């Protein structure tokens, strides 16, 4: 049991390093625009206090940490020249920098939830109106 907690902590530390590398990648002037957009979207989602999939939903609530964030990091890495990503990752591993709070990321997630809820209510109204 102790070993599993230790492995989870190590994965979290590595993800934190990747997120800092994405932040450095976003700020780098030679980063392609598509990679910058993906990087800032992943960072905003990661530091947002509101998840797209709430953690209280069993199993599905952990998908963002286990699947969505690593997929976003992978996409940003694929869109970035290898030498630039390696430089940002080395810099992130060497620094003790932390990610800034991006409250607009939380607002974006709230907006997505509100739109989804609005679409659901609209669908329900159409279904009951047709019946």
Image (cartoon, helix red, strand yellow):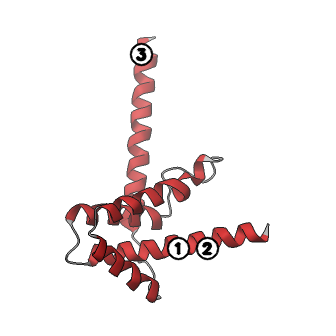
What is the C-alpha distance between the residues marked 3 and 1? 51 Å
How packed mark 2 is, by other alpha carbons closer than 10 Å (few <14, some 14-19, many 20 or more), is few
How packed mark 3 is, by other alpha carbons closer than 10 Å (few <14, some 14-19, many 20 or more), is few
Q: Which residue is mark 3?
A: 129
Q: Residue at x 41, y 40 (%)?
A: 116
Q: Residue at x 20, y 77 (%)?
A: 29
Q: Quadrant of the N terminus?
A: bottom right
Q: Relative to the observer, which residue lies in front, 25 or 61?
A: 25
Residue 21 falls in image quadrant: bottom left
Work out which residue is located at the far front of the displayed protein and give it: 82
Q: Which residue is mark 1?
A: 14
- Residue 82 percent location from the top left of the image: 30, 71
- Residue 3 percent location from the top left of the image: 75, 70
Task: Please determine whether, in this image, residue 121 is positioned above or below residue 95.
Answer: above
CB under 8 Å between discs 1 and 2: yes
Q: Which mark is residue 10?
A: 2
Task: Please determine whether, in this image, residue 126 is positioned above or below residue 56.
Answer: above
Task: Please determine whether, in this image, residue 48 is positioned above or below residue 84.
Answer: above
- Residue 49 percent location from the top left of the image: 50, 64
What is the C-alpha distance between the residues marked 1 and 2? 6 Å
Q: SS of the residue at dot 1?
A: helix
Q: Relative to the observer, which residue lies in front, 112 or 14?
A: 14
**Of discs 2 and 3, which sits in the foreground?**
2
Residue 121 falls in image quadrant: top left
Q: SS of the residue at dot 3?
A: helix
What is the C-alpha distance between the residues marked 2 and 3? 53 Å
49 relative to 9 in the view: left or right: left
How packed mark 1 is, by other alpha carbons closer than 10 Å (few <14, some 14-19, many 20 or more), is few
């Amino acid at each position: 049991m102790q070993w599993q907690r230790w492995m989870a902590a190590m994965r979290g530390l590595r993800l934190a390093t990747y997120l800092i590398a994405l932040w450095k990648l976003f700020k780098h002037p030679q980063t392609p625009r598509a990679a910058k957009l993906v990087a800032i979207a992943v960072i905003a989602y990661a530091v947002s206090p509101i998840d797209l999939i709430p953690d209280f939903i069993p199993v599905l609530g952990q998908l963002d940490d286990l699947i969505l964030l690593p997929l976003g990091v992978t996409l940003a890495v694929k869109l970035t020249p290898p030498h630039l990503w390696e430089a940002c990752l080395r810099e992130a591993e060497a620094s003790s920098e932390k990610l800034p709070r991006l409250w607009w990321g939380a607002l974006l997630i709230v907006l997505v939830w509100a739109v989804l809820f609005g679409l659901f209510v609209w669908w329900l109204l159409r279904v009951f109106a047709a019946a």
